[in-house]
Image (cartoon, rainbow, N blue to C red):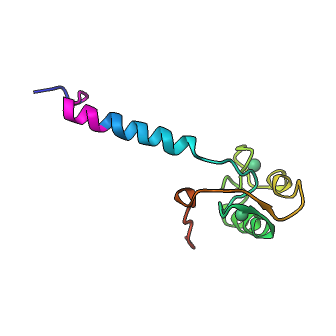
């Protein structure tokens, strides 16, 4: 019997295939700074949702913590408002997140 951290040849093939697919998926990600709701557009909805998430989290980290400092605040708002609206980004549908209401 193999140790628990060892894959048999079939498992190794499956792992390598999944790893390759993951690499392809990650490489296709298109950055869209300021698009916190990942709808492919940076606009007033992002401003509004940043405010909502700041309220919900007590200004702690959220989808809108663009500079990853652990806070959702005016620094992140400046990322959204740094250029005129709307700013479009092309985001493949597979990357759109469903954050729902809760
Ligand atoms: Ca957006
Ligand atoms: Ca931040």
- Does residue 63 lie above or below 29 as drawn? below
Instruction: Check the image and report above or below for 52 versus 80.
Output: below
| Closer to the camera in the image, 81 or 84 | 84
Residue 46: quarter of image: bottom right
Instruction: Based on the picture, tell me whether residue 11 belongs to the magenta stretch.
Output: yes
State whether residue 29 appears in this view: yes
Residue lying furthest left in this view? 1
Residue at the (82%, 65%) spot, across then down: 86
Q: Report whether 101 appears left or right of 35.
A: left
Screen quadrant of the C terminus: bottom right
Is 48 displayed left or right of 12 in the figure?
right
Q: What residue is at 50 percent from the left and 45 percent from the top?
A: 25
Q: Quadrant of the N terminus?
A: top left
In the displayed structure, does residue 67 sit left or right of residue 17?
Answer: right
- The spot of residue 75 in percent (x, y) is 83, 50
* Residue 34 location, quadrant: bottom right
Q: Which residues are magenta?
A: 5-14
Q: Position of residue 30 (x, y in %)?
A: 65, 48
Number of labelled discs? Answer: 0
Please name the predominant secondary structure of the magenta segment in the image: helix
In depth, the one of 61 and 20 nearer the eye is 20
- Foreground residue among 1 and 86: 86
Residue that appears at 79% across and 66% down: 43
Q: Is residue 16 above or below residue 91?
A: above
Query: Where does the image place residue 29, in percent across and percent down from the top left?
Result: 60, 47
Residue 6 figure quarter: top left
Q: Is residue 85 left or right of residue 96?
A: right
Tell me if residue 8 can be seen: no
Identify the residue shown where x is 67% and y is 66%: 56
């Amino acid at each position: 019997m193999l140790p628990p951290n060892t894959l048999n040849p079939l498992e190794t093939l499956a792992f390598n295939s999944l790893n390759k697919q993951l690499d392809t998926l990650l490489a296709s990600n298109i950055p869209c700074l300021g698009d916190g709701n990942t709808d492919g557009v940076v606009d007033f909805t992002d401003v509004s949702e940043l405010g909502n998430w700041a309220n919900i989290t007590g200004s702690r980290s959220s989808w809108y913590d663009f500079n990853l400092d652990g806070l959702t605040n005016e620094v992140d708002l400046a990322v959204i408002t740094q250029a005129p609206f709307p700013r479009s980004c092309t985001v493949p549908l597979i990357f759109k997140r469903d954050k729902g209401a809760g």
